[in-house]
Image: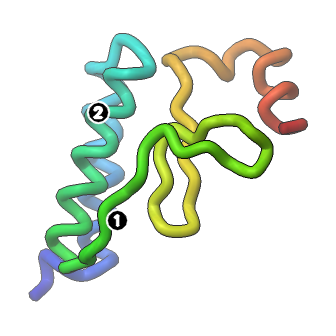
């Protein structure tokens, strides 16, 4: 089905992220809304796995979300506008 193709879903996700960026107020808002988008994609592709949340990594830090081998760290809107924050995250 065309609506289940990766090409269609990537375009859909891009549009939905644009909408989301105009709605979010904080990190938790971002996490909830983006994870909902990812859940919708998992359902459309019949991917049967459950992400894990607040999982402790080898470094001892907690990952906001883990989807298989993909770790997602959510940050509040504007967080990366500060160069020090960007550098700090790149060094982790």
Within 10 angstroms of label 2, few (less than 14), some, or many (20 or more) residues? few
The residue at which mark 2 appears reads as 32
Q: Earlier in the sequence, mark 1 or mark 2?
A: 1
Q: Residue 39: x, y in percent?
A: 23, 56
Q: Residue 83: x, y in percent?
A: 82, 17
Q: In screen coordinates, is 31 left or right of 48?
A: right
Quadrant, the C terminus: top right
Rendering quarter of residue 29: top left
Residue at 24 percent of width and 64 percent of height: 41
- Work out whether residue 60 or residue 81 is closer to the camera in this orientation and state it: 60
Q: Residue 53: x, y in percent?
A: 43, 43
Residue at 23 percent of width and 45 percent of height: 36
Quadrant, the N terminus: bottom left
Element marked by disc 1: helix
Where 86 sits versus 3, above or below? above
Rendering quarter of residue 42: bottom left
Where 83 sits versus 11, above or below? above
The residue at which mark 1 appears reads as 10
Q: In screen coordinates, is 12 left or right of 92?
A: left
Within 10 angstroms of label 1, few (less than 14), some, or many (20 or more) residues? few
Measure the alpha-carbon separation of dots 1 and 2.
19 Å
Element marked by disc 2: helix
Q: In screen coordinates, is 83 left or right of 10?
A: right
């Amino acid at each position: 089905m065309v609506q289940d193709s990766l090409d269609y879903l990537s375009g859909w996700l891009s549009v939905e992220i644009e909408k989301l960026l105009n709605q979010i107020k904080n990190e938790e808002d971002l996490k909830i809304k983006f994870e909902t988008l990812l859940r919708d994609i998992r359902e459309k592709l019949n991917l049967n796995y459950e992400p894990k949340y607040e999982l402790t990594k080898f470094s001892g830090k907690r990952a906001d979300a883990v989807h298989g081998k993909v770790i997602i760290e959510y940050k509040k809107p504007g967080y990366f506008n500060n160069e020090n924050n960007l550098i700090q995250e790149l060094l982790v």
